[in-house]
Image (tube, rainbow, N blue to C red):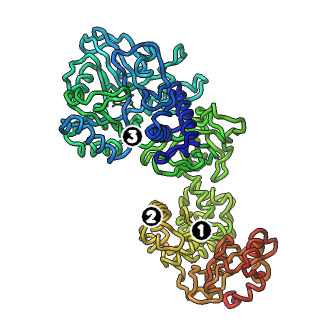
Amino acid sequence: MVHMFETATLLSPADYRAAVAAAVQAATAYYADGSTTLGDDEYDALVRAIEVYEGAHPDEVLPDSPSGKVAGGAADGDVPHSVPMLSLDNVFSAEELAEWAAGLERRLGRPAQGYCVEPKLDGLAVAARYAAGRLQQLITRGDGLAGEDITHAADAVLGLPALLTEPLDVELRGEVLFTHDQFDRANETRTAHGALPFANPRNGAAGTLRAKDRPYRVELTFFGYDAIGLPAELDHTVLLARLAELGANTAATTEAHPQRCATVEAAQQRVEEIAALRPALPFGIDGVVIKADAAADQQQAGSGSRAPRWAVARKLPAVHKVTRLLEVEWNVGRTGIIAPRAVLEPVVIDGVTVTYATLHNPADITRRGLMLGDQVFVYRAGDVIPRVEAPLVDERTGVEQPIVFPEVCPRCGDAIDTGEQRWRCVRGRNCQAVASIRYAVGRDQLDIEGLGGTRAVQLVEAGLVTDLADLFTLTREQLLALERMGETSTDNLLAAIETARSRPLNRVFCALGVRGTGRTMSRRIAAHFGSMAAIRAADADALALVDGIGAEKARVIVAELAELGPLLDKLIAQDVGTAETTPAAATAAVDTAAGDTVAEPADSGPLTGEAVVVTGSMTGALAALSRNEMNELIERAGGKASGSVSKKTTLLVAGEKAGSKRTKAEELGIRILTPEDFADLVAELLG
Ligand code: IVH
């Protein structure tokens, strides 16, 4: 429903009323405990659409409209502020910032005397009252005119001294927030006390400041950016330095420190610098604030009822979004760590579609109390791996399911060591080695019989094999020394390995298990490059020339190949995968290892121009062929093999028990052949 309130569209009267109701509900929840499902982006868009409507229909403005009100009119409190705590107007682009500065210049009748550019801290505004340098009272912003007394929370707020360095009567103003570390610690503490984790840092900070009588303490951080009671002639940058002198924390302690800029162009540059720093900052920011630095400029520009005219917030895209947790995948890393990964309903955060997010470790899932089907807060900033922060427990409908943890290693099937927070396969690094050897020796790859089962484990555990290249240097003595390894099995295994050495390049490449390259892609890559050395030397541009590899996939493959570099070098040095790779070899028989070729599509052959799909079980002359071998055969015959029937398919080979692919091919009027008829068609290749 949020999406109907686009900024540019003029709302209908009914949509306007709905928009006001949605904004009021969101603002109320946000200022109560931060628990709205409406992201900052959507809320801003909603308020903008409301303002556009009200601009066009000034006599129809609803009394509870959030426009022009501090905190959307949602918050309240009973401690009057000495001076109203104002909000900030927003701009959303460099152009809007330039327009704002031009407006300020018109108002001043001259350019502003410099700007201070500083981070817009994503927390809660507070006023801290000091008498003779001693902290007396801490108050929330509330509706800007009066706030809530939260003095009970003051000693948990770092950077807000109980005693200033000078005995002044002063009110410090600034933002209280959880740094990322504080947020994680707070959630650990909460869940250790049986409480639900906070959905996000802002929500958590709001709840923590209000809470009284909690059986535990969690720390927050204060960043000062204003003061009432210091000399009025202080420029803003000087005032910030004074706050620090008095002992308060300010953003000057961070990389995103406030900076004085002479012109609006320089200010814009600093905005971009701070925006770029955002992912690396130890706390959340939701924008950058640009303030006229000179006290004289501020006084001359003055303030409206909601916001000062001498400052503006350049909002940055929201980094928190709500989406649904669909599934949890368990991936085993190189060292055997078993890491859970959330599969999400795709959600766009800061222009990037997020589908996966890290869940850290099983304890973290338990601590966050996540369930499948939950609505969850997801955080993503810059290049940081998106992470699931917490579920929106209030939004549960009862259909959510518990997350099932694996009982055995999802890669090699052995036991899991659950002794540490991060679970690990008992094989550690060897899990990877065993799993990749088992994959590499499979029928469609190197096809080495006798290495699929416990033998691979034995070789890895004996330290004889760490990767597939090591297979080719195994000696008779080494094998004979292994338990349950007699002369016959040793000789058979060595012979099988020797045969594998001359497997065609596509199969050796496929055996590497490079992400994004299955059998078909391995055939295409091998055919395109012709040698392992050429593949090894390929960059992303070269790989992107291979049919079916886009720029993104090319980058993934290049990164994997770089990691596999030492293994590739070993294979090249041992002459593995250097068997004949020219299309000339394509005429050899497919059912002998020696004739198994790189399936480069032949320039001409019985299937030239055909797009072929195979389905059902093969019989007759084709009975012994795996699906991979069928595909290789098709490509050697000049055709293009594919796994699914589409409008592009020209021929379906349908064996026994052909199902939906056959039905679809019939519907599309595609030519269908039995395995026997197909074997006749490609007889010249079957030898
Ligand atoms: S100046 C009159 N500076 O953003 C001065 N506000 O969206 C008004 N905020 O209410 C505030 N970082 O809670 C200022 N560096 C900063 C800020 C900042 C965060 C908050 C503050 C304000 C809200 C407006």
- Check disc 3 and give the amino acid type: Lys
Respond yes or no on whether mark 1 lies under 8 Å from ligand 1.
no
Instruction: Report the residue at 43% width, 67% height from top.
Output: 540
- Check disc 2 and give the amino acid type: Gly
State left or right for residue 259 relative to residue 474. Answer: left
Look at discs 2 and 1 and give the one toward the viewer: 2
Figure quadrant of residue 220: top left
Which labelled disc corresponds to residue 565?
A: 2
- Indicate the quadrant of ligand 1 in the picture: top left
- Check disc 1 and give the amino acid type: Arg
Secondary element under disc 3, as helix, strand or loop, is strand
Instruction: Report the residue at 59% width, 44% height from top.
Output: 340
Residue 213: x and y in percent read 53, 13
Instruction: Report the residue at 41% width, 22% height from top.
Output: 144
Report which residue position mark 1 lands on: 476
Residue 421: x and y in percent read 56, 36
In what quadrant of the picture does the N terminus appear?
Answer: top right
Which labelled disc corresponds to residue 315?
A: 3
Respond yes or no on whether mark 3 lies under 8 Å from ligand 1.
no
Report how far apart the C-alphas of labels 1 and 3 lie in the structure: 69 Å
State left or right for residue 428 relative to residue 447. Answer: left
Q: 340 or 311: nearer the eye?
A: 311
Q: 668 or 613: nearer the eye?
A: 668
Residue 498: x and y in percent read 59, 74
Look at discs 2 and 3 and give the one toward the viewer: 3
Look at discs 1 and 3 and give the one toward the viewer: 3
Q: How many marks?
A: 3
Q: On screen, 350 above or below 117?
A: below
Instruction: Report the residue at 29% width, 21% height from top.
Output: 227
